[in-house]
Image (tube, rainbow, N blue to C red):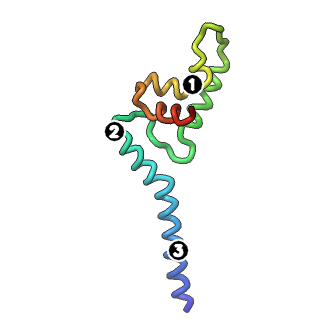
Amino acid sequence: MISNLFIVLFFAIVLWAWRIVNWMWIRPKNIEKRLRAQGFHGNPYRILYGDTNDMATMTKEANSKPIKLSDDVLPRVIPLHHHIVRKYGWNSTADLTLYSCL
């Protein structure tokens, strides 16, 4: 009786772990692979934090510089997207994110 309970518990834990791994790693990497096959480029997927650290440093750097009224506002408002579009072109994953926000 107890061994059956352990077997069921073991399979439940394995199933739960598989779902977590699939949700956090396999599915995002699969989507990244499909986007690259369609010609979209961008930063590679990084688990948990992604581009958060890059975004924070770029925002801090952009806000530390003074801006003139004639300057472009986009690098100041969304510096990470501006950097990715400058680096990878308009056919990038940042372009998808930018248009989904608008």
Q: Amino acid at mark 3?
A: Ala
Residue type pointed to by label 1: Pro
- The structure residue drawn at horizontal position 51% and vertical position 65%, both measured from the top left corner, is 17
Residue 9, by quadrant, is bottom right
Query: Element type at marker 1?
Result: helix
Circle 1 sits on which residue?
Answer: 79
Report crowding for label 3: few under 14, some 14 to 19, many 20 or more residues within 10 A (C-alpha).
few
Q: Amino acid at mark 2?
A: Gln
Marks 1 and 3 in Cβ contact (< 8 Å) = no
Tell me, for residue 38, which label it has, or none.
Answer: 2
Q: Position of residue 35 (x, y in %)?
A: 38, 41
Tell me the residue that label 3 is attached to: 12
Asked whether disc 3 touches disc 2, contact meaning CB atoms under 8 Å apart, the reply is no
Q: Earlier in the sequence, mark 1 or mark 3?
A: 3
- Mark 3 or 2, which is nearer the eye? 2
Q: Residue furthest left?
A: 37
Dot 2: element: loop
Crowding near pointer 2: few (<14 within 10 Å), some, many (20+)?
Answer: few
Label 3, secondary structure: give it.
Answer: helix
Q: Nearer the viewer, mark 2 or mark 1?
A: 2
Nearer the observer, 21 or 69: 69
Q: Nearer the viewer, residue 54 or 83?
A: 83
Percent of width and height locating residue 19? 50, 63
> Which quarter of the rendering shows the N terminus?
bottom right
Instruction: Give the alpha-carbon distance from disc 3 to disc 2, as whole Å.
Output: 37 Å
Label 1 and label 3: CA atoms lie apart by 44 Å
Answer few, some or many: residues within 10 Å of disc 1's Cα (few below 14, many 20 plus, some between 14 and 19).
many
Cα gap from disc 2 to disc 1, whole angstroms: 25 Å
Relative to 9, residue 89 above or below: above
Q: Position of residue 62 (x, y in %)?
A: 62, 20
Residue found at x 49% / y 43% = 46
Q: Residue at x 52, y 87 (%)?
A: 4
